[in-house]
Amino acid sequence: MKFLLTSLIATSVLLAEDEVRMRNLENRVTSLEDSQNGCCYINPPARPFPAECWGLYVSVDPLIWQANANGLPTVIETFDGSDLLHANGKSRVRNFSFDWDWGVRTGIGLNTLHDGWDVLLQWTHFRSDARRKVTADVNDTLVTTQGHPAITSPLARESSSEYELHYDLLDLVNGRQFYVSKYLTLRPFAGFRSAWIKQEMRFSYPETFVRKEDRTFGIGIRGGIDMQWEVCRDLSLFSNYAANLLYSYHSIESHQKGDERVQVGSFYHVGKAIHDMQIGIRYDWFSCDCCYHFGIDFGWELHFHPGQNQVLNFADEAMTGKFFANQGDLGIQGFYASVRFDF
């Protein structure tokens, strides 16, 4: 009897504590929703808009980016020597010199009424090029690095090389931005990405011209998280990260003109990864009815494509069909500004 009485008392206490906890949680949520500062909530939903608003938003981002690709040497320049193997032993690889170029990113989205979720369709367009022209001094020599070794002269006095990049991304993601503290919001998101990437390289040596091309198309999944810290009213710092896994194909061509010709193509499917990172500062303005929002971002971003360069490199003069894929990485980094309008 004493045990039964003790059990009933303990159960009553636990139920009372649960009821108190639930009541406190409901009070906190109600207080959070009803507290107001001026015309908007003190700690509002991260994407506030009343049901009578359209819920649409558009964004335009001018981009100033620089592409960089490794594993694409144009020539090796020797110093005070007529060959790579010489007494002085000083040489230097001459790589492409990449320019800064303009691009654009545009997006259209919808702030839904379902638990504050948003949907975004975004397109990124970027074109870039690079060049490298090298002329050897009187006591120097250029050692060629491109072309089939069986038909390419190993030494040259001058070389001219060009690189072109065509880069387009299409993203469709679904996310939700929410508060985890009074000044910090998180926005996890997931969706799909499609990528079109074309790299073309041209190398001119005396009596030899080499052209290589790598076209990539991929489609796959995308996921990440955006973080925003409020510094003061309307001003915030943000950092974003996304990872992409794409089922892709590479269409590769290698052409060489000279005393003899080489034309080799390759096509295959492969999984590819893309990493996207952003960091910067943000300004937000909301109308009193929270139907309209105007935002400006300024930041730095990086898009990293490991193993993106797969152009063919022939490696043996005797075994003419022996080659290896480049395996070089493609990185695109630079600055951007974003203007967004919700209505």
Image (spheres, rainbow, N blue to C red):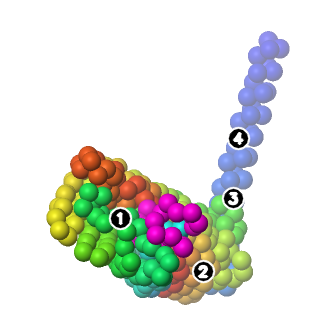
* Helix, strand or loop for disc 1: loop
In the picture of the structure, the residue carrying the numbered disc 2 is 282
Identified at 28% across, 64% down, the residue is: 152
Q: Tell whether 152 sits left or right of 132.
A: left
Seen in the picture, residue 39 relative to 141 is either above or below; the reply is: below
Query: 50 left or right of 250?
Result: right
User: On residue 27, which mark appears?
Assistant: 3
Q: Who's the residue at 37% across and 69% down the image?
A: 155
Q: Amino acid at mark 4?
A: Asp
Determine the CA span between mark 4 and mark 1. Answer: 82 Å
**Camera-side residue of 244 and 264:** 264
| Mark 2, secondary structure of its residue | strand
Residue topped by disc 4 = 18
Q: Is residue 137 visible?
A: yes
Q: Between residue 331 and residue 16, name the one nearer to us.
A: 331
Task: Give above or below for 266 relative to 335.
Answer: above
Q: Earlier in the sequence, mark 4 or mark 1?
A: 4
Nearest-to-viewer mark from 1 and 2: 1
The quarter of the displayed image where residue 211 is located: bottom left
Percent coordinates x, y for residue 323 in the rendering: 30, 50
Q: Secondary structure at mark 3?
A: helix
Residue 237: quarter of image: bottom right
Find the magenta span and give its range: 69-90
Which of pointers 3 and 1 indicates the residue nearer the eye?
Answer: 1
